[in-house]
Image (cartoon, rainbow, N blue to C red):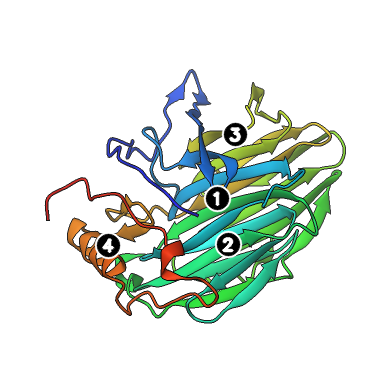
Amino acid sequence: MSNLIKDASASSSLDCPVVEGRRQVQHVAARVADVGGIPIHRVLPSRQRRLVGAWCFLDHAGPVVFRGDSRGMRVGPHPHTGLQTFTWMIAGEVLHRDSLGSEQVIRPGQVNLMTAGRGISHTEESLLEDPQLHAAQLWIALPYAHRHTVPRFDHYPDLPVWREEGVTLTLLVGEFAGHEAPTLSFSPLVGLDLDAESDATLRLPLRPEFEYALLPLEGQPTLEGEALVTDELAYLGRGRDALELALPAGARVLLLGGEPLGEEVLIWWNFVGHSKAEIAEAQREWEAGGERFGRVAGFSDDERLMPPPLPWRV
């Protein structure tokens, strides 16, 4: 996915205050954008919240059904640095191609994970044999020590799945409630999808040293008596050892968490870096068509997406 964030005033506080014995929740409204021809709701990064652990970007795409002569989603060749792109597919099919030569269709219940490291380019196209799309697209910032790691692509068709109280839980990354996902990560993280087939109330164990957030994808769940809104991020902060979540039938929620990264992370367009100089260098090399990002087979140079001018002097 492609990103353009100019606002640098996001909150850096990791703790939500306790008022009258009740820990508060920070609500972060989504912004609607267009990516590859489809509407998405973007909640990270935002003015109010830039990171949750190493999670630094979160788009909720769909649910949408393509009709008539729609081409679906099509995102041309674009670069990434300093991050992992993480796609969780709920409905539809998307074809991923990258400059390593990877070509992989992702289907519902699967994760595609691309580690950009020092630099990679890729494309995404929805396949209209299944004319719908519903997905969460996330970025994970690589810690400074791993920011120039060798690029790679991983596909995870099988993830830990279990049921509790009429809810199907899928562990996308990390460890949770005795389960462990195979997904590659460079910092302590957790990602959990909760899909309620019937009304249910779950008590979920948390790690107090992690910061957490919830994103309702469908339906209207309730967190400890407080109603949550679809496509509004509920940031929970640190210090919790559990949460109680009520899910009506048909509700779907993402739980994201991680150890605070403790490092400055900068995002400009599709680049993540730890300094303006890193990002400026990456942008110059992409614009110049150098070999750092490679080429995606089957696409011409005219289809390459180009960034806006840098917002600072270099």
In the depicted view, which residue is nearer to us: 106 or 125? 125
Is residue 65 among what the camera can see? yes
Label 1 element class: loop
Which residue bears the numbered disc 3?
Answer: 231
Q: Is residue 159 left or right of residue 261?
A: right
Q: Which mark is residue 36?
A: 1
Tag 4 secondary structure: helix
* For the residues bearing labels 1 and 2, Cβ distance under 8 angstroms: yes
Where does label 2 land, which residue? 124
How many angstroms separate mark 4 from mark 3 (CA)? 31 Å
**Dot 1 or dot 4, earlier in sequence:** 1
Q: CA distance from mark 4 to mark 2?
A: 21 Å
The amino acid pointed to by label 4 is Gln
Q: Residue at x 34, y 37 (%)?
A: 13
Query: Which mark lies nearer to you, 1 or 4?
Result: 1
Q: Which residue is mark 4?
A: 283
